[in-house]
Structures are given as C-alpha cells and as structure tokens.
Image (cartoon, grey):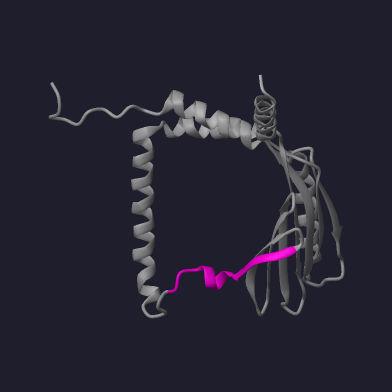
Amino acid sequence: MSTWVYVALGLLLLGVGLFFLPLRVRFSLQGRGEPNGFWALAGGAQLGPVATSGVMAQGVEAQLSVHVFGKRLWGKKLAELASPRAEDNVTDDREAEATGALERARARYAHLERWLDPVDLFLFVTRERRRVELGPTQLDLEYGFRDITLTGKLLGAIYAFAPLLPDAIVIRQYPSWESVDRGSVAGSGSVRLWPGLLFVDAAWYLIRNVKIRQPRAGKGA
C-alpha cells in the first residue's frame, strides 16, 4: 500500500475518534437586584475558542454577542432580532396570535404523530441524558427582604430543595437580615456531551421507529 493510503486511513481514524470525543461547554451567570429598583443580568457559554455572551439591565437593551479567540465577530440587540411589527392593534391581535399558535402546535403534533410515536420519542430523549453529563456547578445566592420571616422561609425552602438536585450542583446561601429587598446570584459550571454518540443514537432510533407511510385510500388494489 502506498504512503498516501496510510495517511488517508490515519486521517479517517482520527476523524472518527474526534467525532466520538466528548465536548465540554462551560457556562456562567450573574444577576443582581438593588433596593432602588435597578437590576442587571449577564451570562455566557464557551466551547473551545468560541464564546457567546448576553447582557441585559434596567435601561439597557438586551444584547447578544459571539467571540472567537477573544475577538468579537457578531453582536446584536434582541430588539433587532425580533421581527418588526406594527404597534397598532397589538392588544386586539393577542387572542388571534394565541389561537394561531395553538393551531400550529396541534398541526405539528399531528405531523409528528404520523411519523413517530410521541410517547416513545419522549422516552428516547429522556434516556439520552446519559450522553450529557453535568460537571461541577456552583450557585451562590445572596438575598434579603424587608420581611425577615420571608428571608427565613426562603432559606429553609432552598435547604429542603437542594438535596433533590444532582450531586454536581452545589448551592451556597448568604441571607441578609437587614430588612432590605436585595438579591444577587452568581453561578458557573460545565456540561460534557457526546455529540457523535447522540447523532448515532438518533439515527439508529429513526431507522428503527419511523413509521412507513400507508398508501392513501383509493390508490392501489
């Protein structure tokens, strides 16, 4: 065999290996609310050299941006991403929009049902959690309310709820007893996923479960 055949075979094996390697997505979130009504929220996620971030605050339009190797390549305000619409008759159109959305959801469900069993599909998606692994995730909460009893109730509720979360999630609380409405949240963590295995599982599931369309009535004999 020639050298080029070995090179091609090596590249093919390398590509297959990379296809099945896990990817790690790191994420972070920060938010704050002050007694004077000011609030701000920011978050981001990173996959290798690619990072996305978003920020919104009182008096500041929400923005999204994408960075590669620390260089900003794309940025938009959420208002610019939304499709323009007239301000007139907004209230009158809400009921029509809700009805249209419900009809579209029914149509999509009926279309899905012609090809797949929705319940079985839901169970498949649930089982695929094994391809997504939550890494160490830390959440720091600082909060306080004018009603101190409400602060105590929230403290107890979070302590009771925390054991129900995955072991990878750690919640640290810092309650304030100053009778002031104030709060902040800071979280960071990572998720490891296997996109290659997810793709293979999905392809195999479709091969085994996609329904074959029945011939329409009146055709064939």
Q: Position of residue 17 (x, y in %)?
A: 69, 30
Looking at the rendering, in which quadrant would you find the N terminus? Answer: top right
* Left or right of residue 190: residue 174: right
In the depicted view, which residue is nearer to us: 134 or 93? 134
Residue in the image at 40% along x and 74% along y: 91
Looking at the rendering, in which quadrant would you find the C terminus? Answer: top left
Residue in the image at 73% along x and 77% along y: 38
Q: Is 78 contained in the magenta span? A: yes
Residue 123 vertical position relative to residue 184 in the rendered view, above or below: above
Q: Position of residue 125 (x, y in %)?
A: 55, 34
* Residue farthest toward the top in the current orientation of the protein: 1
In the depicted view, which residue is nearer to us: 76 or 40? 76
Q: What is the span of residues highlighted in magenta in the rendered image?
A: 71-84
* Left or right of residue 221: residue 13: right
Residue in the image at 79% along x and 64% along y: 184
Residue 187 figure quarter: bottom right
